[in-house]
Image (cartoon, helix red, strand yellow):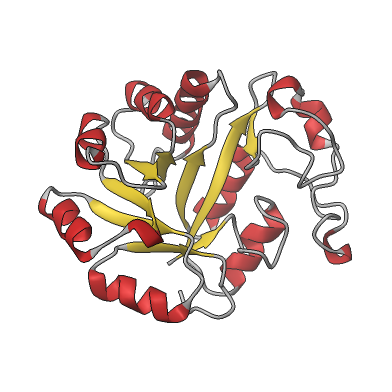
Amino acid sequence: MAAHRGAGKLAPENTMAAMRLGASFGYRMVEFDVKLSADDVLFLLHDDTVDRTSNGVGRAADLSWHGISQFDAGAWHSHHFVGETMPTFTAVMAFCQGNAIAVNAEIKPSAGRERETGAAVARAVARSWANAEPLPLLSSFSEIALDAAREAAPHLPRALLLDKLPEDWLARCQRLGCIALDSNWRALTPEIVATAHAHGLAVMCYTCNDEAAVRALIKMGVNTIITDAIAEIAP
């Protein structure tokens, strides 16, 4: 089991507070989203803009890290998290390494910055995670970003994210040298899981918050399930 964006919906997503809270529930794997600022600093954010999850305004790709780092990224969630900020990718990696938490870093590039974001994430992991196992898993919906990550650090494990599985899902994973398929959980079937395993691919899925469905996915052979329900579903 992996905690979605740090702690599901119990803390402001993609913040250090979320990472700490997820770990406090016993989760030893975390999923989060990584973007590039206008001046090429890697930080955590899901959306193309900072509007929804901070008091800032604008596209992340147009904003400097200095500006982004000043935004309050916690008040939107609840008063308890007022003053929480968006962390750098480096800071989150250090926290995860220091607390033996496995990482699924989703490369979430702004439009037009797919290749540079994928390469930057891979290079950062290769520098920061040289002597620790397991290596972070790099995942993305962007095949361009994953391809760039492969070129920058071919030894790092990768997973292709897919919402609806096209007929060529296996070929896409193989072309990118992925070790895993990461699918919308509702798109998975026993046959898909078996096919992936038969070709050496692990199977991950997002974002399942129903305990009965989680049990069914485990029975199906799904290797890792990403969830928001960290308080209800044991890791």
Q: Quadrant of the C terminus?
A: bottom left
Image mark count: 0
The residue at 33%/21% (across/down) is 151
Q: Residue furthest left?
A: 198
Q: Quadrant of residue 171?
A: top left
Q: Position of residue 52 (x, y in %)?
A: 77, 45
Which residue is rendered at x = 61% and y = 72% of the image?
24
Q: Residue at image x 66%, y 33%? A: 48
| Nearer to the camera, 23 or 217 | 217
Rendered residue at 74%/20% (across/down): 62
- Choose between 197 and 34: the one closer to the eye: 197
Quadrant of the frame with the N terminus: bottom left
Task: Give left or right: position of 170 versus 92.
Answer: left
- Residue 104, how many percent across, how many down? 45, 49
Q: Is residue 69 above or below residue 94?
A: above
Q: Is residue 194 above or below residue 45?
A: below
Q: Is residue 11 left or right of residue 90?
A: right
Foreground of the two, 213 or 13:
213
Q: Position of residue 211 (x, y in %)?
A: 45, 79
Position of residue 141 in the picture relative to residue 42 (left or right): left
215 relative position to 68: left or right: left
